[in-house]
Amino acid sequence: TYPGWEATISCPCAPPVAGFASNSPQCIGSSFSFNNTGSTGGGYTYTWTFSSGTPSTSTSENPTGIIWNAAGTYSVTLIICDVNDPNCCTSTPQSITVGDKPAVTAVATDALCFGQCNGTVSAVGTGGTSPYTYQWTDGNALVVDTTIDLTNVPTGNYTFVVIDTNGCSAFSTILTISDAGAPLITASPDTSICEGDSTVISVTIVGGVVPYTYLWDNGLPGDSSHTVIPI
């Protein structure tokens, strides 16, 4: 300070380093997390802006639980400022990807006969971002296969899962493979008739898979009932 003169000397701020990482890509409705990789500690403030996200802003150093409800590419910006100089700031933008969820269509075909392991299940994955990976799980939530279509499937419950390249997944409803059960045969009751008279013999079948094939002994044709004249 000189007589008649007065000056204030200040040093330029050292700009903070701004940078961050995230768990992008994620799916619609999934939780995004962001981690500051720049200047850290109590000497800085952090201001995040999440374009179209929920919430849309945060002042946490490492915010979590950010959600986007539509697929697309969105801008995320982090501004780091010196706590003692709000004009001494550095900002960095990045783009994050929100993937659409895939969809599943799956069908099951029952086993043809009682006790046979010849049911089938098949599925198609659409939407999301290909390529996909697949899983079939059984009623005990154990993975039984990783292909789209299964043949020679035992009876039981199955669920199909499609997972796209972003890790977004979709589940089918529970598919049940059943068999038709063993056919049950009820024959007409024994009948006593006189020599030369006729009577009707018949069978009734329930269960199994129609149509039925009838095989009688004594060379009778393949019908469910016959009029016979014992010799």
Image (cartoon, rainbow, N blue to C red):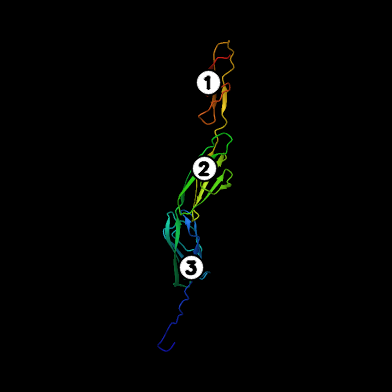
Q: Tell me residue 192's x, y (percent).
A: 59, 13
Residue in the picture at 53% in, 19% down: 226
Q: Nearer the viewer, residue 199 or 84?
A: 199
Amino acid tagged 3:
Gly
Secondary structure of the residue carrying tag 1 is: strand
Secondary structure of the residue carrying tag 2 is: strand
Residue 73, quarter of picture: bottom left
Q: In which quarter of the image is the N terminus?
A: bottom left
Q: Quadrant of the C terminus?
A: top right
Q: Which mark sits nearer the N-terminus, 2 or 1?
A: 2
Distance of label 2 from label 3 (alpha carbons)? 48 Å
Residue neighbourhood size for the residue with mark 3, other residues' Cα within 10 Å, grouped as few (<14), some (14–19), many (≥20): some
Q: In this view, does 96 lie above or below 124?
A: below
Amino acid tagged 1:
Ser
Residue in the picture at 48% in, 57% down: 26
Q: Return the residue at label 3.
A: 19
Distance of label 2 from label 1 (alpha carbons)? 38 Å
Confirm whether residue 45 shows in the render: yes
Distance of label 3 from label 1 (alpha carbons)? 86 Å
Q: Tell me residue 112's x, y (percent).
A: 54, 35
Q: Is residue 74 above or below residue 196?
A: below
Give the numbered dot on residue 121. 2
Q: Which of marks 3 and 1 is in front?
A: 1
Q: Tell me residue 106's x, y (percent).
A: 48, 44
Give the numbered dot on residue 225. 1
Secondary structure of the residue carrying tag 3 is: loop
Q: Which of 132 and 166 is in front in this view?
A: 132
Confirm whether residue 64 shows in the render: no
Residue 138, quarter of picture: top right
Q: Which of marks 2 and 3 is in front?
A: 2
